[in-house]
Amino acid sequence: MAKKSLFDLGGLVYSTEVGRTCPVCRQAIADCVCHVPKRPAGDGIVRVSRETKGRAGKGVTLVKGVPLDDDALIALGKKLKATCGSGGTVKEGVIEVQGDHVDKIMAALVAQGFTVKRAGG
C-alpha cells in the first residue's frame, strides 16, 4: 500500500485568514464555485412533518421539498416562523420550526399556492 501525501488527502482544510477552504480549488468556501452543493430536484410536492429525533424529545416541524432558491427559502422560513409565533432555522434546504405547528404551516403553504402533503403520520 502506497503512502499518501497530504495533497492526496485533500490538502489545506482550514486557514486562519479565510476559514474553511475547498479542497479542490483551495479557495474559501464562500468563494468556491467548483464545489457548490446542489439540491436535488424534487417532485413539486412540499412535505410537512413533525420530528423529535435527536432533539431531546422536543418537537420540531420540518418543511421539505420547497422548490425555491436559498434566499427565497430563508424568507419563507421567516414568514412561517412568524405565522406560528415560534423560532426555527433553515438548514440544507429544510425549514425547521420549533414546536408542533403542522396544521398552521400546511394552511400557510396552501395559501401561497404550494402543493402540500403531510408526511410521517
Image (tube, helix red, strand yellow):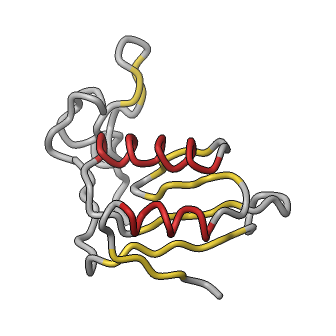
Q: From this viewpoint, which residue is outermost toward the right?
A: 57
Q: Which residue is at a point 15% across and 39% down the rendered structure image?
A: 33
Q: Position of residue 64 (x, y in %)?
A: 44, 67
Left or right: 108 in relation to 60? left
Image height of 24 relative to 62, above or below = above
Left or right: 97 in relation to 107? right
Q: Which residue is at a point 56% across and 48% down the rendered structure image?
A: 83
| Numbered circles on residues, count | 0
Quadrant of residue 56 in the image?
bottom right
Q: Quadrant of the N terminus?
A: bottom left
Image height of 17 relative to 83, above or below = above
Q: From this viewpoint, which residue is outermost toward the bottom?
A: 121
Q: From this viewpoint, which residue is outermost toward the front?
A: 111
Left or right: 95 in relation to 59? left
Q: Position of residue 54 (x, y in %)?
A: 74, 62
Q: Which residue is at a point 71% across and 64% down the rendered structure image?
A: 100
Quadrant of residue 58 in the image?
bottom right
Q: Nearer the viewer, residue 91 or 98?
A: 98
Q: Position of residue 13 (x, y in %)?
A: 39, 34
Left or right: 78 in relation to 120? left
Q: Quadrant of the C terminus?
A: bottom right
Image height of 80 relative to 42, above or below = above
